[in-house]
Image (cartoon, coloured by chain):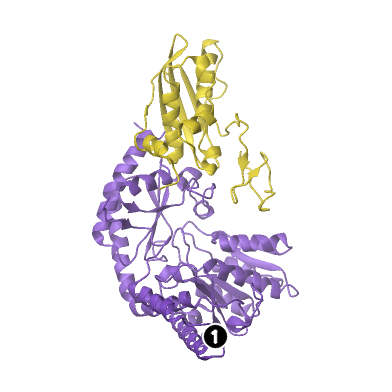
Chain colours: A yellow, B purple
Amino acid sequence: MTMYSKTVMDHFRSPRNVGVIENAGGMGEIGNPLCGDMMTIYLKIENEKIEDIKFQTFGCGAAIAVSSMLTEMAKGKSIEEAKKISNKDVAEALEGLPKNKLHCSNLGADALHLAIKDYEDKKAGKKKPDDKRKEQHEHVDGDACHCPYCDSEIADGATLCTACQSEIEVQH
Amino acid sequence: MDMKIINLDYLSANPLLPEVQDAMIEAIRENHGNPSSQHGMGEKALKALTNARESVAKLLNSSIPEEIIFTSGGTESINHAVKGVAHSQSKKGKHIVTSNIEHSAVLRSIKRLHMMGYKVTSVPVDESGRVNPEAVAKAITDETILVSIMHSNNEIGTIQPIEEIGRITKEKKVIFHTDAVASVGVVPIDVQKLGVDLLSFASNNFYGPAGVGGLYIRKGTPIWPLLEGGVQESNKRAGTENLIGIIGTGVAADLARRDMESRIAHVSKVKDKLLRELPNYIDDYFINGHPKHTLPNMVSVSIQYIEGESVVLMLDDEGIAVSTRSACAAGSLRASHVLLSVGRDYADAQGTMVLTFGVDNEEEDVTKFLSSLKEAVKTLRQISPLYPLS
């Protein structure tokens, strides 16, 4: 498999911080129904710092490597620092990802931000609005959607790919 | 890294058999010339082309070799059959009947025709991936000009009741094409028995070269060329023939006919062992396809709570080549339409592997594969948020 960088393969083969934190201070779940990747991030926070972070991921090699790299990047950081980590930062730390994976599998930072929000909501005494797995991922970095047939960039929610004229079922 | 690679992905790339290699190398060295030339070299080339055509005709049980035209592969053959018939019949009608689980070459050819104003009825399949011939019969209208149903499915191996559908199309006088790319050279194919008007095949599925395939066109079937130009291939496919590849195809067809029974017996043994022993290694999986009407060289298995590409990468580290139908694999980002059609959900479709066997596999390959698979599944399920831990 030559499509992935050495760093991606290293994190895929030996993923760091796999697992669950019981009674986590913050938890973030994200999923992409189109290609099926799902990630859960667990945070243990003390003095507004990420003391521990764990992940569980269902997904391809890229998704597992992204989760692993993200946890390494976030561990030990303050909440405010961790909020600044973007999906792009994770991809760069992995020495890049194949183009078609940038959108689909690169959801680690989104899951982290949700976990931080969950922590902050809990702290503020807000009830979690919905416990169910999120079925839609947010385009935080302005990532575009891609046509499932020809992989060209398309507008979010578009039903017709302008490049290959394929009809697209909008599933998110 | 002198590891013996265990190839359980024959469908992606068959090796060329030594006899095929020899014939092609000899052809390269000899300079066969152009079959259309009128001098001696051209004559020799034409002879080689005719021989290869006869070999393929015999493999498909056509008594008229000219019913076979050579193409650049399965994709071109399918595009030619579907679009060539539709265009030639557009004054008669504009309705096409197909199935929900066709290869993308069929689906997208038909989609293109749909964009041009043709109407399409797509017949569903049951949980085993089989089309009900009655549903095909019901879908045919006075406007129907073409039925295109695949012989066997390239993802789950299910073989369709082509003979029965062939009887229906004959009775209703509708042209019938079958995509037999995954079948030709793997199981016996008899165009007379099947009752098809057109049949697509690819050489690399029976140890011939990639980039060569063909289309069986029953004599008298109206069809326009896909490629316009010279008068090669009975005026049905323009362009100087890929003679080296076609020579390899002819030899591969002869070998497939000669060895059909022993090859089926060999891959069946590997497949049976895998299906028998799989439950000793992993749990929570589905075998896709029909238990009886199925390709002898293919197993499709959906493993729950894990994703296929990750399994492919882990097995690759162990020197085992397998293929996945997970959408996350390079290229497509969609769950397989075939797996969704036979009732798999999105997550289970993601965990699907397609194993295809061939002449070089041994029964011990299965044991090695299963041990490695067990470890990969265990590791990935430990990471997976979907796996019910306790």
Q: Chain of mark 1?
A: B
The relative height of residue B376 versus residue B7 in the rendered view (above or below) is above
Q: Which residue extends farthest top?
A: A47
The relative height of residue B249 versus residue B210 in the rendered view (above or below) is below
Residue B84: x and y, percent? 65, 73
Residue B137 visible in the snapshot: no
Q: Nearer the viewer, residue A107 or B99?
A: A107
Amino acid type at circle 1 is: Glu
Residue A117: x and y, percent? 54, 19
Helix, strand or loop for disc 1: helix
Residue B134 visible in the snapshot: yes
Residue B321: x and y, percent? 36, 54
Residue A74: x and y, percent? 45, 22
Q: Quadrant of residue B115?
A: bottom right
Is B12 positioned to the left or the right of A80 in the image? left
Q: Nearer the viewer, residue B255 or A95?
A: A95
The relative height of residue B336 versus residue B257 in the rendered view (above or below) is above
Q: Which residue is mark 1?
A: B66
Q: Which residue extends farthest left?
A: B364
